[in-house]
Amino acid sequence: MSVPISVGDQVTFRRRVLLSDILLYAGITGDFSPNHVDKRSALGTDVGRIAHGTLIMGLMSTASSLLHESHGRPTVSYGYDRVRFVRPVRVGDVITTRYTVEELDLARSRGFSNIACTNQEDAVVAVARHITQFLDPGGLTPRGAS
């Protein structure tokens, strides 16, 4: 079985993280940790609020969607491995998410991609490995799922 992407395929997605993003995300998830919503207590310093790590994972998901929507075959996320939040993301940071296909498992119709998020200073703020599952072209049944 063939899949519609190749090892080395890459997409880059860039977005500025706004205060409204952090506050709305806190409201959606119920995570009102002072690190995210209290201007003065973030990380016990005066550096200000920081974004939720899972908000940054949402940017990873966007990059994945941009790559996989381009081929027209249904694809779903099978999960993320080795997720690390290396540095805090502050209000106003511009995050560049680079999503690169690293490996394909044709027998199980899966792709494995590395993701790196960097800020405007090109410092890594988050990394992960993403697993995608390619579905049958006509339906939502995973091919080779186990």
Image (cartoon, rainbow, N blue to C red):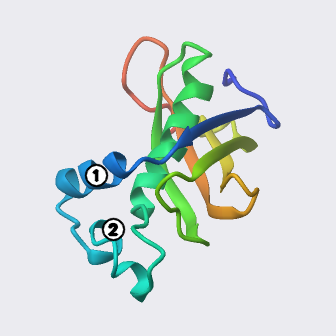
Q: Is residue 86 left or right of residue 23?
A: right
Name the residue located 26 percent from the left edge and 74 percent from the top edge. Answer: 33
Instruction: List x then y, in percent, for residue 60.
Output: 54, 46
* Nearer the observer, 7 or 20: 20
Given the image, on which type of amino acid does mark 2 rest?
A: His
Q: Are marks 1 and 2 in contact (CB under 8 Å)?
A: yes
Q: Earlier in the sequence, mark 1 or mark 2?
A: 1
Which corner quadrant holds the N terminus?
top right
* Nearer the observer, 137 or 24: 24
Q: Could you tell me how far apart the alpha carbons at marks 1 and 2 are, in whole angstroms? A: 10 Å
* Nearer the observer, 134 or 35: 35
Query: Looking at the rendered structure, which numbered label has been put on residue 101?
Result: none
Q: Around disc 1, counting alpha carbons within 10 Å, would you say few (fewer than 14), some (14 to 19), or many (20 or more)?
A: some
Q: Is residue 114 left or right of residue 8?
A: left
Q: Which marked residue is nearer to the observer: mark 1 or mark 2?
A: 2
Instruction: Give the residue pinned by disc 2.
Output: 36
Instruction: List x then y, in percent, for residue 106.
Output: 68, 35
In the depicted structure, whether residue 139 falls above or below residue 111: above
Residue 52, picture quadrant: bottom left
Q: Around disc 2, counting alpha carbons within 10 Å, would you say few (fewer than 14), some (14 to 19), or many (20 or more)?
A: many
Query: Looking at the rendered structure, which numbered label has been put on residue 25?
Result: 1
Instruction: List x then y, in percent, for residue 86.
Output: 61, 72
Secondary structure type for disc 1:
helix
Secondary structure type for disc 2:
helix
Name the residue located 67 percent from the left edge and 46 percent from the top edge. Answer: 113
